[in-house]
Image: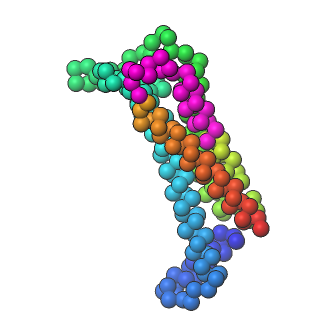
Amino acid sequence: MNFAVIRRRWRRIRLEGGRSRLTPANWSTVIMLVLLAAIFVLHIACIIILLTATIDNAWWIFTAGNMPTDIWARWIFVNNSWHSVDFPQTYPQSYLQAVQASSVLACIFSIIGIFVFVAQLFTLAKGQRFLISGVFQFFACLCIMIAASIYTDQFHTDEKSLGSYGHCFILAWIAFALTFLSSVIYFVLRKKTAE
């Protein structure tokens, strides 16, 4: 169903004051609009979670001294203020850069995906509509999974008793699950609209 047809049917339902007979065509229009809105909200939630996981400073939290570490710096609370300190020399810098790059790429792919989603609603034909958005979400899913996996495998392996993973690390894994779900939904919708 074309998006312009959905808009016309929705406008007709609204103009009749909502008292129109609900035919199967009207119901399918309403269901499609609710589905599109839910997908849009899920995509926005994925972007917010990805940005929070990438920008905030709590991938690892040392229990002694309340010292959070993120993928950009290590923070120390001294004299009622937070100070950024460099990572120790034992940190594997190449892995850290891979985590940083993958996290940023996940955010970029997801943001591009939402713009492509909106553009596809108005420009592409029925069977091709959600494929590109699904591909961008899948790339975002892969990138954040790579970042979280590298961080799990390479960092703080000998410091397990000194701290725990922070909320940003957990958000990165949640973002992985949500972006994967979002990409699957896009691919399923593409198949349904192609039929």
Foreground of the two, 171 or 108: 171
Is 147 drawn above or below residue 194 in the view shown? above
Q: Residue at x 61, y 42 (%)?
A: 141
Asked if residue 35 shows in the view, the reply is: yes
Q: Residue furthest front?
A: 161
Q: Residue at x 50, y 20 (%)?
A: 157
Kindly indicate the quadrant of the structure image that contains residue 68: top left
Residues in magenta? 141-164
Q: Residue furthest top?
A: 89
Q: Residue at x 56, y 89 (%)?
A: 21
Q: How is the image coloured?
A: rainbow
Q: Residue at x 53, y 43 (%)?
A: 175
Foreground of the two, 130 or 14: 130
Q: Residue furthest left?
A: 79
Asked if residue 133 shows in the view, the reply is: no
Kindly indicate the quadrant of the structure image that contains residue 61: top left
Residue 193: x and y in percent read 72, 65
